[in-house]
Image (cartoon, rainbow, N blue to C red):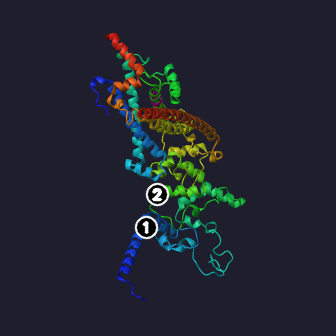
Amino acid sequence: MKLQTGTKRKKNKVLTGWIYAFLTAGYIFLAPVLLPCTLAASPAPDATWFVDMNQYSSAAHGSLGCEDCHGAMIESGPGREKPHPDPDGEDFLKYQTKRRFDYQSCRKCHKTAYSRFSEGAHAAAADEEKKTGSVSRTGHAPVCGDCHSAHYSKSHLSRVQTGRIMTETCGTCHPDQKTSYLSNYHGKAAVNLGHEKSAFCTDCHGAHTTMSLKDKEAALNACLRCHANAPPEFANIIIHDTPKTRDMKNDEKQAGLKWVYAARAVILFFVVLVLAFFYSHTGVLMLRKLHEKLRRHK
Amino acid sequence: MEANPTPADTFQRFHVLHRMLHVVIIFNFTLLAITGFALHFSEFGWVQVLVSVMGGAAAAGWLHRFCAVFLYMGVLVHLLWLFYYKFVLKQTWSGPDSMLPGKKDIKDLYQNLRYAFNKDTPPLFDRYSYLQKYDYWAELLGMQSMGITGLILWYPDFFAGILPGYFINIAGYLHFYEAVLAVMYIGVVHMADTHLVPDIFPMEKSIFTGNIEKKRFMEDHPEEWKRKQMTNSETA
């Protein structure tokens, strides 16, 4: 093979330079798109069987050892309290961990939370599920692990950070409530604008009792935590204002919601009517005046 | 461009008080719209940045209430002036110089629409055209309604004591839809009719300077001009 001539080599160099420049420019332009993609591609912590130890050790429970919660892990054998599952067993790594794990072990450290949970609506739903065996329309009655990640929950989060995560967590099973909360002043100020004094889910419904607040007195008590002068009627203000959850409300609120939607329809009709009239009025007159003006200039 | 008109060619159209009140409205209306819609559309990232620039949700809320009170003080000053106008200056609230709507306004509206379709000549307006009157009443009544619903949302614990609870929800919807109406009306109709019409574009300055040129006076308010000439000839 002949050696390349000087000009050819030079041409190639120029071409390579252009390719490099192109790639660099491309990366710079695409960086805002590519970076989040690469970040998202890193394994996300999930309720799988394998624990990401890097994330675990920096999470709230990072100082605990496996056996603190899971009990002594020992080879299976007769007389063992909690044998390690048989790797050759049929359901090995196949069942849902959350449905089998005994969350009694959370109680060892989180006594208050646990006792509140056992008095609350979620625990009642769990009992119901056990009795009837039927799963409610929002899914399985949640146990600790359905809302909290034992391995990856961070500690020392701010009130707003916790609240934002909470809105997503509760919203997984209660999407209509999440939507209506976020269209309410409380949700807009708290979640969207990070206003600490506004209310997040648990500020009204309780962190572990998770009350429905259908009962007026319970609702008023929730209001009174922030609105110290709230009269009894205050509890009839509709917070989760959506037709989707209307049948979950008490009769008074259902009746109120009808008036709210009627009033909204009337005002919407009025707004559309006024704007339609004046926009067309201004539109045709503007065209006429432009026409006259242009004709005068001819 | 015409040469600057000599003072003899201009006439005072707006008293300094009304010019100031108009500026008060512009200032507060704009800030109220920004801070109010910033809460309603707070799911957008750039709105969150805007609110944090204003000092967070609490500061934006404070600014919204401050501007509301400031604006309503303007309304009160205007109402006081109305009484001053009638009882001290001994003028009347009705008549062709007033903002009160009359039969002529409906006639003018009809004629203006006919004019738009080239079936008539443009109507001859008096001191205030029917659109200017509509601007005035929409603003004045709108501010009462926005004030009431705003107060209900400001003190829900007080108003839940005298009204059914769902009225606070209704007040929320009214406040929002009316804000949309106000901004879409002022931002498009008022802007187009007063500033963007071909003869006036780019800007109608009389509400800021207080003065109107003779040519514009004769074109835009011919009836008032006619009355003015008649009284002048009577006194002369």
As drawn, the residue found furthest toward the front would be A298
Which secondary structure lies at badge 1?
A: helix
Residue B196 at x, y percent in the picture: 42, 36
In the rendered image, the quadrant that contains the C terminus of chain B is top left
Q: Nearer the viewer, residue A185 or A297?
A: A297
Q: Camera-side residue: B77 or B230?
A: B230
**Which part of the image, by quadrant, shows the N terminus of chain B?**
top left
Q: Residues within 10 Å of mark 2 (few under 14, many from 20)?
A: few
Q: Chain of mark 1?
A: A
- State the residue at coordinates (60%, 51%): A176
Quadrant of res B2: top left
The residue segment tinted magenta is B136-140
Q: Quadrant of residue A95?
A: bottom right
Considering only order in the chain, which callout, 1 or 2, is on the residue closer to the N terminus? Answer: 1
Q: Nearer the viewer, mark 2 or mark 1?
A: 1
x, y (%) of residue A69? 55, 70
Identify the residue position indicated by label 1 in the image. Answer: A26
Q: Residue B34 location in percent, x, y?
A: 42, 43
The amino acid beneath tag 1 is Gly
Q: Is residue B13 visible?
A: no
Q: Is residue A184 above or below residue A133?
A: above
Q: Secondary structure at mark 2?
A: helix
Left or right, residue A133 beside residue A223: right
Q: Chain of mark 2?
A: A
Q: Amino acid at mark 2?
A: Gln
Residue B200 badge: none
Marking on residue A161: 2
User: Would residue A224 be counted in the magenta stretch?
Assistant: no
